[in-house]
Image: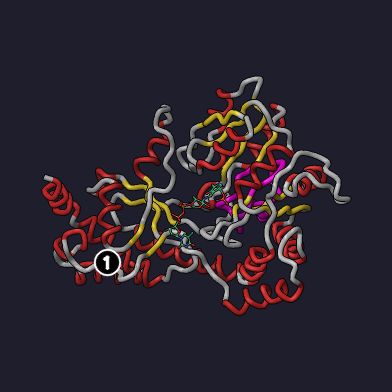
Amino acid sequence: MEFRLRANISSIRDRREVTDLAIFGGEPAFSRSMYVSRPSVPSLDMFMVRVAEAWERQWFTNDGPLAQELERELAAQLDVSHCVLAGNGTAAMSILFKALDLDGEVLIPSYTFISTAHALSMAGIKPVFADVEPDSWNIDLAHCQRLLTRGTSAIIATHLFGATCDVGALERFCKDHGLKLIFDSAHAFGCSVDGRPVGSFGDAEVFSFHATKAFHTFEGGAVTTNDARTASRLRKLRNFGFDENGHVAMVGTNAKMSEIHAAMGLANLECIAATLKRSQDCHTAYQQALAGVEGISVYRPDLRGRSNYHYVVADVDSKRFGLTRDQLLRVLQAENIVARRYFYPDRSRDFPYTDRLNDRLIQFPGGADVKVTDVEKICSLMAFIGNSSRDISAMLAASVD
Ligand code: T4K
């Protein structure tokens, strides 16, 4: 591959000495920080046109016209009957627990964002952690089977890093055991399974529209479902329990999305196809350029379905690469490449595959706003680091002494 060749050659030319690395006093490869999950943005004009509509109306929240339009657009795009917006993904998840009357214990993957476990605990429901599968990194059904008790009411499965779960197997399992099934689709906007978009699987799916997500509204979230009763309950629950007539029909909270957030969503939705395409180009560039770097395996999020390619994550095999994941993070961060380890699960349980991800997973700056030329630069540096890992390791050890 011409691109890979060019990257590797330039790595050797640009960085002949280990002492050129920023961690040992050299110039950083990037003058400004290269973040993971940099938010993609529409043109300011596209956003402001929508803001002006709300300004003109002086209607800023409480199920306003922009929020309603965004709900309709999202439901159409995700091919689902109901989309109920919320202030963020965690609030969306919390009102869904009430809408579905969950109680007792709920099975969740041990490798996911802490918000799910916290939302369950705050609702008085016990989160029960299941390990993840070695290949897909999504919740392991065999482990779920062993964790079932008479108190289990649901499974919440995360489509991690834009890699869809085995939705068919999960749906069958939950049906057989009388469990509700929720998908945490915070990472999966724009993904699909056999041509069917993520958004209509299980009893409901929950999205986060946080600024760092593939599709965002600055802060925001939504529940999507084909069940009219669930949607109707969610609409009341997010608005203090009020029904359409202003009567308090149930105990509720405030989980509404404002018009300014919906304005960002509508503007972002106009360019979502181009955004996802740029993310895929970025991901492909990493896959190709890192394929020749010994010990670094870029995770393929598209083995079970179509991905949004928003997350570029890789496994670091320290024996083959020559540095541990954490040593690599230090070297990259000095270069202003703010790679991360992502989640920080509890280590007190003996979950072999979660522990493995905990030790070895690295997330690189990815997504629509990372240029392929920057990917080239990062990967050429990675090749140099891999080739010089013995010297780097010795110098890191000496700097500690
Ligand atoms: N389920 C899953 C699987 C999730 O990942 C999340 C949220 C949820 C559920 C819950 O949904 P929400 O309630 O959040 O809607 C972030 C986000 O706050 C959170 O939404 C996200 N997942 C979580 C994994 O990450 P931090 O603490 O990592 O954010 P921060 O500030 O360190 O930013 C991450 C990177 O993005 C940095 O490299 C900087 C960059 N960044 C960030 C922001 C906010 C920007 O470039 N611009 C920005 O505006 O939590």
Numbered range of the magenta stretch: 183-206
Left or right of residue 338, residue 278 in this image: right
Please indicate, yes or no, whether residue 380 appears anywhere in the rendered image.
Answer: yes
26 relative to 101 in the view: left or right: left
Q: Answer few, some or many: residues within 10 Å of disc 1's Cα (few below 14, many 20 plus, some between 14 and 19).
A: many
Name the main secondary structure of what is drawn in magenta.
loop
Could one spot residue 227 in this view of the protein? no
Query: Is residue 257 rendered magenta in the image?
Result: no
Which residue appears at 74% of the width and 39% of the height?
A: 99
Quarter of the image for residue 227 reads top right
Residue 349: horizontal and vertical position, in percent?
Answer: 43, 27
Q: Mark 1 points at which residue?
A: 8
Farthest-out residue, top: 150
* Residue displayed at 67% across by 64% down: 262
Label 1's element?
A: helix
Type of the residue with mark 1: Asn
